Amino acid sequence: MEFDSKYANEYDLPYPEGVRYPYARMSMTDRAAQFAPFKALTGYEDAVDEAARLTDAKIEPDESGIDLLNAEMQILQDHIAETPEITVTYFLPDEKKAGGRYVALSGRVSRVDDCRRVLRFTDGKTVPMDDIFSMDGEIFDALFQSGAEEV
Protein backbone atom coordinates (compact mmCIF):
# COMPACT_ATOMS: atom_id res chain seq x y z
CA MET A 1 0.00 0.00 0.00
CA GLU A 2 1.15 3.44 -0.71
CA PHE A 3 0.33 6.30 1.57
CA ASP A 4 1.45 9.88 1.29
CA SER A 5 1.39 10.50 4.97
CA LYS A 6 4.24 10.66 7.42
CA TYR A 7 2.60 7.67 9.23
CA ALA A 8 2.38 5.46 6.14
CA ASN A 9 4.87 2.97 7.53
CA GLU A 10 2.65 2.36 10.61
CA TYR A 11 -0.60 1.45 8.85
CA ASP A 12 0.27 -2.21 8.40
CA LEU A 13 1.57 -2.78 11.92
CA PRO A 14 -0.49 -5.02 14.28
CA TYR A 15 -2.44 -3.42 17.10
CA PRO A 16 -0.16 -3.13 20.12
CA GLU A 17 -1.09 -5.11 23.21
CA GLY A 18 -0.97 -3.28 26.50
CA VAL A 19 1.96 -3.91 28.76
CA ARG A 20 0.02 -3.34 32.00
CA TYR A 21 -3.19 -5.10 30.91
CA PRO A 22 -2.43 -7.56 28.11
CA TYR A 23 -5.79 -9.31 28.65
CA ALA A 24 -7.81 -6.08 28.41
CA ARG A 25 -8.48 -6.28 24.69
CA MET A 26 -12.18 -7.13 24.27
CA SER A 27 -13.59 -9.50 21.74
CA MET A 28 -16.11 -8.06 19.28
CA THR A 29 -18.93 -10.00 20.99
CA ASP A 30 -18.10 -8.56 24.41
CA ARG A 31 -17.78 -5.07 22.98
CA ALA A 32 -21.17 -5.37 21.28
CA ALA A 33 -22.77 -6.63 24.50
CA GLN A 34 -21.94 -3.32 26.20
CA PHE A 35 -24.30 -1.52 23.87
CA ALA A 36 -27.11 -4.11 23.87
CA PRO A 37 -30.54 -2.86 24.99
CA PHE A 38 -31.51 -3.52 28.60
CA LYS A 39 -34.76 -3.69 30.55
CA ALA A 40 -35.07 -0.66 32.74
CA LEU A 41 -38.08 -2.09 34.58
CA THR A 42 -36.82 -5.52 35.54
CA GLY A 43 -39.54 -7.41 37.39
CA TYR A 44 -42.36 -5.09 36.28
CA GLU A 45 -43.99 -7.73 34.08
CA ASP A 46 -43.88 -10.26 36.94
CA ALA A 47 -45.54 -7.74 39.27
CA VAL A 48 -48.30 -7.06 36.72
CA ASP A 49 -48.89 -10.79 36.22
CA GLU A 50 -49.08 -11.32 39.99
CA ALA A 51 -51.60 -8.50 40.38
CA ALA A 52 -53.72 -9.93 37.57
CA ARG A 53 -53.78 -13.43 39.10
CA LEU A 54 -57.18 -14.14 40.61
CA THR A 55 -57.80 -15.73 44.00
CA ASP A 56 -60.99 -16.95 45.62
CA ALA A 57 -62.40 -15.83 48.92
CA LYS A 58 -62.89 -18.42 51.64
CA ILE A 59 -66.51 -19.54 51.94
CA GLU A 60 -67.66 -19.92 55.51
CA PRO A 61 -70.16 -22.80 55.82
CA ASP A 62 -73.58 -22.11 57.26
CA GLU A 63 -74.94 -23.90 60.34
CA SER A 64 -76.21 -26.94 58.41
CA GLY A 65 -72.86 -27.22 56.62
CA ILE A 66 -71.03 -27.17 59.94
CA ASP A 67 -73.35 -29.85 61.33
CA LEU A 68 -72.73 -32.02 58.28
CA LEU A 69 -68.95 -31.62 58.57
CA ASN A 70 -69.09 -32.45 62.28
CA ALA A 71 -71.12 -35.62 61.57
CA GLU A 72 -68.67 -36.65 58.82
CA MET A 73 -65.74 -35.98 61.14
CA GLN A 74 -67.31 -38.20 63.81
CA ILE A 75 -67.81 -41.03 61.28
CA LEU A 76 -64.20 -40.59 60.15
CA GLN A 77 -62.94 -40.87 63.74
CA ASP A 78 -65.09 -43.97 64.32
CA HIS A 79 -63.57 -45.69 61.24
CA ILE A 80 -60.00 -44.38 61.51
CA ALA A 81 -58.59 -47.86 62.25
CA GLU A 82 -59.66 -48.90 58.73
CA THR A 83 -57.71 -46.00 57.17
CA PRO A 84 -60.70 -44.96 55.06
CA GLU A 85 -60.22 -43.46 51.62
CA ILE A 86 -61.84 -40.04 51.27
CA THR A 87 -61.72 -36.93 49.12
CA VAL A 88 -61.40 -33.67 51.02
CA THR A 89 -62.08 -30.30 49.43
CA TYR A 90 -60.36 -27.57 51.42
CA PHE A 91 -59.31 -23.93 51.16
CA LEU A 92 -55.60 -23.37 50.47
CA PRO A 93 -54.59 -19.78 51.35
CA ASP A 94 -52.43 -17.95 48.82
CA GLU A 95 -48.88 -17.21 49.99
CA LYS A 96 -48.56 -13.86 48.23
CA LYS A 97 -51.95 -12.16 48.40
CA ALA A 98 -55.32 -12.24 50.11
CA GLY A 99 -57.60 -15.15 49.27
CA GLY A 100 -56.64 -18.54 47.92
CA ARG A 101 -58.14 -21.48 46.06
CA TYR A 102 -60.08 -24.65 46.73
CA VAL A 103 -58.16 -27.90 46.36
CA ALA A 104 -59.37 -31.51 46.34
CA LEU A 105 -57.15 -34.14 47.94
CA SER A 106 -57.88 -37.86 47.78
CA GLY A 107 -56.20 -40.46 49.92
CA ARG A 108 -56.36 -42.68 52.97
CA VAL A 109 -56.67 -40.95 56.33
CA SER A 110 -54.33 -42.30 58.99
CA ARG A 111 -55.16 -39.95 61.86
CA VAL A 112 -57.51 -37.21 62.99
CA ASP A 113 -55.29 -34.95 65.09
CA ASP A 114 -57.60 -32.93 67.36
CA CYS A 115 -54.72 -31.14 69.13
CA ARG A 116 -53.25 -29.69 65.95
CA ARG A 117 -56.66 -29.66 64.19
CA VAL A 118 -55.44 -31.49 61.07
CA LEU A 119 -56.28 -34.63 59.10
CA ARG A 120 -53.20 -36.75 58.45
CA PHE A 121 -53.05 -38.94 55.36
CA THR A 122 -50.98 -42.09 54.94
CA ASP A 123 -48.77 -40.36 52.34
CA GLY A 124 -47.75 -37.71 54.90
CA LYS A 125 -49.97 -34.88 53.65
CA THR A 126 -52.03 -32.89 56.14
CA VAL A 127 -55.20 -30.82 55.79
CA PRO A 128 -56.22 -28.20 58.37
CA MET A 129 -59.66 -29.06 59.77
CA ASP A 130 -60.71 -25.41 59.90
CA ASP A 131 -60.20 -25.06 56.12
CA ILE A 132 -62.23 -28.15 55.11
CA PHE A 133 -65.19 -27.30 52.91
CA SER A 134 -66.50 -30.82 52.19
CA MET A 135 -65.60 -34.50 52.53
CA ASP A 136 -66.67 -37.36 50.32
CA GLY A 137 -66.15 -41.11 50.53
CA GLU A 138 -67.85 -44.46 50.87
CA ILE A 139 -67.77 -44.32 54.67
CA PHE A 140 -70.11 -41.32 54.56
CA ASP A 141 -72.75 -43.13 52.44
CA ALA A 142 -74.49 -44.46 55.58
CA LEU A 143 -74.84 -40.89 56.88
CA PHE A 144 -76.53 -39.74 53.70
CA GLN A 145 -78.78 -42.82 53.51
CA SER A 146 -79.95 -42.42 57.12
CA GLY A 147 -80.51 -38.71 56.49
CA ALA A 148 -82.62 -39.49 53.40
CA GLU A 149 -84.76 -41.99 55.31
CA GLU A 150 -85.58 -39.43 58.00
CA VAL A 151 -87.03 -36.99 55.45
Image: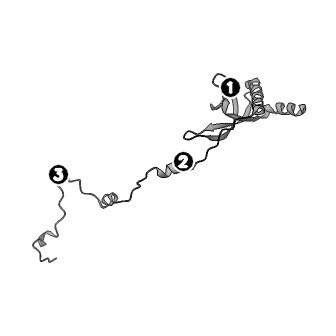
Name the mark on residue 138.
none
List the residue tagged with mark 2: 50
**Where residue 130 appears, x then y in whole percent?**
67, 30
Q: Tell me the element at label 2.
A: helix
Residue at the spot x=17%, y=60% of the render? 16
Q: Secondary structure at mark 3?
A: loop
Mark 1: few/some/many CA within 10 Å (<14, 14-19, 20+): some
Q: Earlier in the sequence, mark 1 or mark 3?
A: 3
Q: Quadrant of the C terminus?
A: top right
Please indicate, yes or no, whether residue 121 appears anywhere in the rendered image. no
Q: Residue furthest left?
A: 6
Q: Which mark is residue 111?
A: 1
- Badge 2 or badge 3: first in the primary sequence: 3
Residue depicted at 16% across the width and 53% down the height: 19
Foreground mark, 1 or 2, reads 2
**Up-down: is 9 above or below 69?**
below
Front one among 21 and 69: 69
- Give the quarter of the figure containing the N terminus: bottom left
* First-in-chain label (1 vs 2): 2
Residue located beneath label 3 in the image? 20
Report helix, strand or loop for mark 1. strand
Measure the C-alpha gap from mark 1 to mark 3: 73 Å
Q: Amino acid at mark 1?
A: Arg
C-alpha separation, residue under disc 2 versus residue under disc 3? 50 Å
- Mark 3: amino acid: Arg
CB under 8 Å between discs 1 and 3: no
